[in-house]
Amino acid sequence: MELNAHIPSGPLAEKWDNHKFSSKLVNPANRRKFKLIVVGTGLAGASAAATLAEQGYKVHAFCIHDSPRRAHSIAAQGGINAAKNYQTDGDSVFRLFYDTIKGGDFRAREANVYRLAQVSNNIIDQCVAQGVPFAREYGGSLANRSFGGAQVSRTFYARGQTGQQLLLGAYSALSRQIHSGGVTMFNRREMMDLVVIDGRARGIITRNLITGNLESHWADAVLLCTGGYGNAYFLSTNAMASNVTAAWRAYKHGAGFANPSFVQIHPTCIPVHGDYQSKLTLMSESLRNDGRVWVPKNTGDKRPPADIPENERDYYLENKYPSFGNLVPRDVASRNAKEQCDQGKGVGSTGLAVYLDFADAIKRDGQSTILRKYGNLFQMYEKITDSSPLKEPMMIFPAVHYTMGGLWVDYNLMTTIPGLFALGECNFSDHGANRLGASALMQGLADGYFVIPTAVAAYLGESSLSQVSDSASPFTDAQQKVGQRLQKILRNSSGSATGKVTVDDIHKELGRLLWDNCGMARNKQDLESALQKLPEIRQKFWDKVYVPGSGSELNQSLERAGRVADFLEFGEIMIHDALRREESCGCHLREESQTEENEAKRDDANYSHVSVWEYKGDGVEPEMHKEELSFEYVTPSQRSYK
Amino acid sequence: MWLLRFFSSSIGKKILMAVTGLLLLLFLVAHAVGNAAIFFGSSAFQAYADALHSLPVVVFVFGLGLLVVFLVHITIGIQLFLQNRKTGAARYAVTTRVVKNTFASSTMPYTGLLILLFVVIHVFGFGVNPSGVEVSTLVKDLLGNFFYGLFYLFSFCVLAVHLSHGFWSMLQTLGFNHPRYNDGIAKLTYIVPGFFLVFFGTIVLYFMTGIGAAY
Amino acid sequence: MSTIDLTLQIWRQKNSDALGQLENYTLEKISTDMSFLEMLDVLNEKLTLEGKDPVAFDHDCREGICGMCGAVVNGVAHGPEKETTLCQLHMRHFKTGDTLVIEPFRSRAFPVRKDLVVDRSAMDKIIQAGGYVSVNTGGAPDGNSIPISSHLAELAMDAAACIGCGACVAGCPNGAAMLFTSAKISQLCLLPQGHAERKQRALSMVETMDKEGFGNCTNLRECEAVCPKNISIRNIARLNREFVKATLSEG
Ligand SMILES: Cc1cc2nc3c(=O)[nH]c(=O)nc-3n(C[C@H](O)[C@H](O)[C@H](O)COP(=O)(O)OP(=O)(O)OC[C@H]3O[C@@H](n4cnc5c(N)ncnc54)[C@H](O)[C@@H]3O)c2cc1C
Ligand code: HEM
Ligand code: HEM
Ligand code: SF4
Ligand code: F3S
Ligand code: FES
C-alpha cells in the first residue's frame, strides 16, 4: 500500500492556494455528465452534496434516517471554532493551526491542519449567509466564547444547539438542491458495500430499510461521510445509528484505516445508571469553567456529598494541576476521573462517577448568574437524573465521544482507493491523537463546503473513467454477496430463540471488552488478552445471535446485527493499533509510557507517524504501514498542564 | 387567478373566516347601538326604526352585504369543518386534549349553526316585517313571550361561547399575537362576548320580566 | 432504585398496506430511571427471546435533538411531560398499574411504515419548497457585515429550535403542519439574510403544505402544547401575516 499524502509544495501559508491553482478543473458544461455518490448527510455529507450539486454535478445522496436533517451532527452542542479574531484577543489562522496541532499532540499533518484553520473563516460567513442564528452581541455582531481551555475566544455558537443549527443550514442548502433536481435524495438507505471496478470506487450497494430491497448505484466517485465509530463501545455519546460499516467495507476493499485506536473520551458525561442503559449523554464541557471536580478522600466513603466535610474532599484536578485546575484537556480530565474510581473513591450507586460541584460558584456569583450560564444544562441533567445541580453536586463520568481515527486520506481527502473520498469524522482527520473542542464541526464543514469541490474536480479532471452500469456483473455479484451475508446473520432465526442471545447482548459484551482493555488507559497485557477474547465473542455472535423477522421487511434487529458484525471485526485493528503504538499520545495512554508524575509520555523518535492498517484477508493479520509525520513550522513539545 | 388561489389555500380560508367573523362582530356592535334606543322608550325606538326604513336603499344594501358575509362565514366554516374531519378526527384510540377549556374552540361549527338558527328565526320575527305592526310593539309582544325570550337568552349564550374562542382566534388569524398585548387580548376574549350577552340579555329580560310591560 | 409494573397497549402494524391493531403487553420491574425508549428496548429484548417480532420505533440521538423519535402516549404526542421528547421522557413519571396506550404519530401525510414508525418526508417537502436562503457556497460576505440585534437573533433561534419531529401535526386535531412550517418561515423572515425571498418562500411553502395533505389550522393550540421545543403559535400568526403580504403583492 503506497501512502502519498500529495502535500502541495510551497510555504505552509500558500500550499492551499497553490494547490487550488495547480489542480485540474472540470468545465461547468461537463459537470452534469458526472454522477457522484454521497453517503451520510451529517455536516460533511450535507454540505458536500449541496455544494457539488450547486456546481453542476449530478449527486445522489444517501442517509439512514427518514430525513437527512437527523444525522448525528445535530447533537453537537458547544460550538464551532474559527480564526476570525473578532475579539482582537490575539487569535490568527496560525494560532488556530498551532493550537489544533498541539491539542492533537503532534500526530496530525501540518498542511491539512493549516488549511483547516484557513477555511474556518469562510465557514462562518457561509453559515451566516444561510441564516444560521448564531448568538449575537447587543450591538449586533457575532458573539464568541472561549471553549475547551483555549486562551482565545474563537468559538461561535447558537445556544447549546450549534451542531443542530449548522446541520440545518447545510440541510437547507441540500433541500434547495433536491428541489432543483441537482441532488437525488435516498432516505432510509444503508450502504452495505462498496463496488470497486478496475481499482477505482465506482458505486455502492444499499439496503432499503423499509422494503429490505438491495439496490445498486453506480457513480464516477464515491464520498463517504459516514461519521465516527464510537459505538463500537456500545455505550457512547454517539447517536444510535452511527456505525463503522461503510468505512469498514471500504477497508476490506483496500482502503487504509488510520489510527483506529485514537478514541476521545469526554470527561463530563452523565454516569451510567443501569445495565439497560442504551446511550450516554454529554454535558457540555463549559460546565468545568465554574464547577469544581472532587471525590471523597477516603475510599468507599458512601456518605451523601453534603455530609462530607471540606477537609475530607479531594479536589484532585486542582491539587494535581494548579495552573489549569478543572480546565485541563479532555483526555487528562477523563484519565484522572478513572484513576480516582479505580482507587475506590468513585461516588454514586455504581462507584463510577465523580462530583462536579457548583456550590462555591453559586456562593460567589449567585444562583441567577449560574443559571443564566448553565440553566438549560442543569434542566437536561435534572430531567435525566432527577437531581438538581443547584441542591447537590452533579455526578459525571467519562464516556466515548469522538474518534480521531478513520479512513486514511491524502491532502485531497482521497483514500487509498482512487475515486473513494472520506470526509468529516469518517476520515482520520486533522485532529491527530486528540481533538480540541469545537473543531469537529469546523472540520466537517471545511471538508464538505470548501475542500471536496477542488479535490473531486482534480480527480475527475485527470482520470479517464470507463462507462459502468449498475446492472452489470460487478454490481450484481456485490449485491449477491451482501444478500448472502444477511442470510448468514439470519440463519439462527429458524427455530426457537431458546439458548440464543440478542444482538445487544453481544454488542454490550464487545463494548465492555473494548472499554476495559482499549479505553482510557491501555497496557500490553490487557490488550493482548483482549485480542484473545475478541474472536470468542465473534464466534458467539455467529453461532448464537437470534435475529427475528426476515430480510425483506423493515427489520431493526437485522440492521443492528449487521453493524455489530462489522464492529466485531473492526475491534481487532483497534486493539492491534493500540498495542503497536507503545507510546502515550493525546487520548492514547499506554501505562508503560508515562513520566514520573505519571503523565502521558510521547515518543517522537519512534512514533511520530500515522499508523495505517491494510486488510489482508479474513483471519489474516492486517498489515500496518506508516506515514511519517514531519514538522517544519512547529516544534513538537511535551504537553504539560502542571 | 391569485385571489382564487388565496382563498383556496388553507391560510386564505382562515383569513376569510376571520374577516367575516370581524364584520359580523362589527354588525353586532352597530346592532347593539341601534337597539339601545329600546331603553329610551317605544317612541324613541320606533323613531329609530322608522328612520332606518326611511332609507330603503341603505337597508337593502346593508342587509344584502350582511347576508353575503353570513353566507361566506358559514360556508367556509362548514367547509373547514368537513375538511378537517377528514385529515384529523378519530385518528387515535385514545385522544387527549392538552389545552385547557377547549369547549368553545372545539364546538365552533355547532355554536355557529345554532346562531344561524337564531338569526333565521329572529330575522323572520323582526327583520322582514309583513304586517304593518310597529316594530316596537312587535319586539314587546315577541319578547314578552316567555319561551321566545328563553330561546333568545339561550342563543345569546351560544353566541357568547362562539365568540369566546372566535374573538381571540380572529386576532390570531389576522396576525395579532405579541407578548406585550396577549394579556389584554386574553381579557377581551371574555369581555367582548360578555358584553353582548349582558347587553342583549337585559333587553330580553326587560320585556320577559314585564318591566317593559308599560312599554 | 424503585421499579414499576406496567401494562402496554402498542399499535402493531406489519407494513403500510397491512391493517394494524393494538396489542397488550405487560412489563414488570421497570426502573424509574429508564427513559421511555429504554423501556421499549427492554420490551423488545423480551419479545426477541420469546421469538416474537420486536416493536419497531424510530430513534437516533436519544437526547431530544434529532427529532427522530416520537409516539402518541395515552393520546398525547411525546407523552405527558411538557417540552419533552419521547426519548427524554423518563419512567419516573408513571406508576405501577398504569396502562400506556402507545400509537404512532398519525396524519394523512404520515403513512405508517411499521408499528410506531411513520414516514414524515412530507415535512422535508415543505422545506424543499423554500425553507432556505438561496446562496451558493463561497463568496459569502463577512459574517459581521450585517449587524443583527441579539434580540432578533434570539427570536430567530427560538423558531429555529424546531427539531422537525412532527408532534405538532400528530397533536393537532386537524392534522395541520402550521407550527412546523411557521417556525422555519419565522426564522428566515426575522433574519435579514432571508428577506430577499420571503414572499416567494411563504407562498410556495404554504402551497406545498396544503398539497401534502396536512389539515387547516383553526387555532386550536394543541401543537404548541405538545411541541417538545416550545415553539410558540406566535410563529403561526407571523406566517399568516407573511402569507397575506406575499399574496397581496406577488400572489
Ligand atoms: C454529543 C456530542 C456533542 C458534540 N459537540 C461538538 C461540539 O460542540 N463541537 C464540535 O466541533 N464537535 C462536536 N461533536 C463532534 C461532532 O458532532 C461530530 O464529529 C461531527 O458532527 C461529525 O459529522 P460528520 O458529518 O462527519 O458525521 P455524522 O454527523 O455522524 O454523519 C454521519 C451520518 O452518516 C450516517 N451513516 C453511517 N453509516 C452509514 C451507512 N452505511 N449508510 C448510510 N448512512 C450512514 C450516520 O447515521 C450519520 O447520520 C460532538 C459530538 C457529540 C456526539
Ligand atoms: C351563523 C352561523 C355561523 C357559523 C356556522 C359560524 C362558524 C364558525 C366557525 C366554524 C368558526 C371557526 C373558524 C376558524 O377558527 O378558522 C368561526 C369563527 C368565527 N366566528 Fe362564526 N359562525 C357563525 C356565526 C357567527 C356570528 C353570527 C358571528 C359574529 C358575531 C361569528 C363570529 C366568528 C368569529 C369572530 C370567528 C373567528 C374567526 C377565526 O377563527 O379566525 N360567527 N365561526
Ligand atoms: C335582544 C336582542 C335583539 C333585539 C331586540 C333585536 C332586534 C332587532 C330588530 C328590531 C331588527 C329589525 C331591524 C329593522 O329591520 O328595523 C333586527 C334585525 C336583525 N337582527 Fe336583531 N336583535 C337582537 C339581537 C340580535 C343578535 C344577537 C343578532 C346576531 C347574532 C341579530 C341579528 C339580526 C339580523 C341579522 C337582523 C336582520 C338584518 C337587518 O335587517 O338589519 N340580532 N333585530
Ligand atoms: S414545531 Fe415542535 S412539534 Fe412541530 S416539528 Fe417542530 S419541534 Fe416538533
Ligand atoms: S393545533 Fe392545529 S389548529 Fe392550528 S394552532 Fe395548532 S395547528
Ligand atoms: S431520539 Fe432524537 S429526539 Fe428522540
Image (cartoon, rainbow, N blue to C red):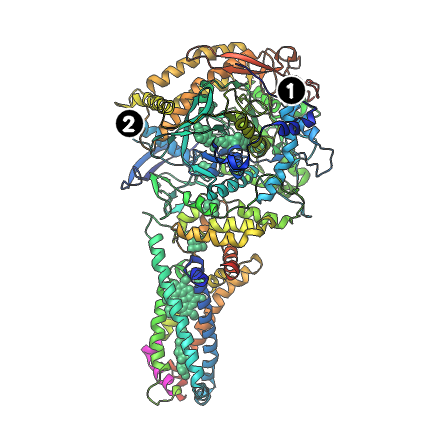
Residue, x 35% and y 89% (percent of image)?
B133
Q: Is residue B72 left or right of residue A587?
A: left
**Residue A154 pos. (x, y %):** 67, 35
Q: In this orientation, which residue lies closer to the viewer: B106 or B14? A: B14
Task: Classify mark 2: residues with Cα within 10 Å, few (<14), some (14-19) or many (20+).
Answer: many
| Residue C189 visible at all | no
Residue, x 46% and y 71% (percent of image)?
B23
Task: Classify mark 1: residues with Cα within 10 Å, few (<14), some (14-19) or many (20+).
Answer: many
Position of B59 relative to B156 (above/below): below
Q: Is residue A13 left or right of residue B196?
A: right
Task: Look at the numbered disc 1 and give the secondary structure of its residue.
Answer: loop
Q: How many marks?
A: 2
Three-letter residue code for mark 2: Gly
Task: Please state the extent of the stretch shown in magenta in the rendering.
Answer: B137-150
Res C57 quadrant in image: top left
Three-letter residue code for mark 1: Phe
Q: Chain of mark 1?
A: A
Task: Look at the numbered disc 2 and give the secondary structure of its residue.
Answer: loop
- The lab-note entry on whether marks 2 and 1 share a chain reads no
Q: In this orientation, which residue lies closer to the viewer: A456 or C115? A: A456
Res C58 quadrant in image: top left
**Could you tell me how far apart the alpha carbons at marks 2 and 1 are, in whole angstroms?**
52 Å
Q: Image quadrant of ligand 5?
A: bottom left
Position of C18 relative to B101 (above/below): above
Q: Is residue A629 left or right of residue A401?
A: right
**Residue C9 pos. (x, y %):** 32, 40
The disc placed on residue A106 is 1
**Residue B34 pos. (x, y %):** 46, 81
Q: Are marks 2 and 1 in contact (CB under 8 Å)?
A: no
| Residue B127 visible at all | yes
Is A100 magenta? The answer is no
Residue that mark 2 sits on: C51
